[in-house]
Amino acid sequence: MKTVKINIKQLFVGLIMLGSTGAVFAQTAEPITTTQAQTNPTIEGLKKQVETNPKDVESLAKLATAYQDATDWQNAIATWKKLSVQLPDWAPSYYSQAYSYQSAKDNENAKLSYEKYVATVKPEEIEASKKNLAYAYFFIAFNEQKDSPDKAKEHIAKSLQYDPSNQDAVKLSQALNS
C-alpha cells in the first residue's frame, strides 16, 4: 500500500475554509497565560467575563475563538475543553478542539477530538455539518493509513460520502484501495 503525502499547509487552509468553528466548550484545565494573551484586549475582556461567570458558555466560546485567532493554541484547547465539559453534546466544541490540537501539531489528540466530533454530531445536524464531517473523517483516515489501513478505508469512504469533490480525499482513497 502506498502512503499518501499531503501538504500540511493545504490541510490547514482547507480546514479554515470549512467555515467558522462557532462557539465551543471545554474541560477543566486552566488556560496557560501567555504574553500574547495578556496584551490582547479582546482576550483580557473575555477572561474577565468568564471569571465573573464561569458557566457563561457564550463568553467561553468567544474566548476560545479569540485564543485561536491569536494562535494561542494551548489556551484555545484548554478553553474548548472547558466548554465541552459544560456542553458535552455540542459537537462544534470537539471540532474546534481538534483544529486547535492540529494547529499545535498534536495530531494524536487532534485525531481523538475529530473522532469525538463525528460521534457527537446529531442526525439533524448532519446536513449543515457535511464539510466539517468530511474533513474530520479525512484527517482520521490520513492519520490511520499506516497503522490501520482498513479503518482508514472506512473513514475515507465516509469523507467522500460527505464531500466527493475533495481531491485530497480522492487521492487518499485511491492510494488506500490500490
Image: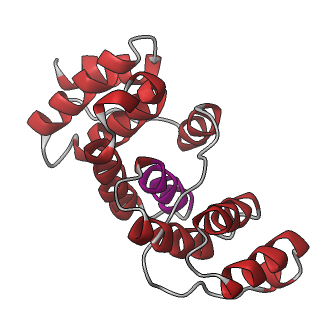
Q: Residue at x 9, y 34 (%)?
A: 150
Q: Nearer the viewer, residue 85 or 66?
A: 85
Residue 144, by quadrant, is top left
Q: Which residues are magenta?
A: 92-103
Q: Nearer the viewer, residue 41 or 122?
A: 122
Q: Residue at x 56, y 57 (%)?
A: 103
Q: Quadrant of the N terminus?
A: top left
Furthest residue toward top: 165
Q: How is the image coloured?
A: secondary structure
Q: Residue at x 68, y 87 (%)?
A: 51
Q: Position of residue 106 (x, y in %)?
A: 44, 64
Q: Is residue 86 above or below residue 168?
A: below
Is the stretch drawn in magenta largely helix, strand or loop? helix
Count of numbered circles on the image: 0
Residue 113 within the segment the image draws in magenta: no
Q: Residue at x 74, y 78 (%)?
A: 49
Q: Position of residue 4 (x, y in %)?
A: 34, 32
Q: Position of residue 146 (x, y in %)?
A: 20, 45
Furthest residue toward left: 150
Residue 58, by quadrant, is bottom right
Q: Nearer the viewer, residue 52 or 15?
A: 52
Residue 73, by quadrant, is bottom right
Q: Quadrant of the C terminus?
A: top left
Q: Is residue 172 above or below residue 27?
A: above
Q: Nearer the viewer, residue 160 or 83?
A: 83
Residue 139 placement, left or right of 73: left
Residue 111 placement, left or right of 59: left
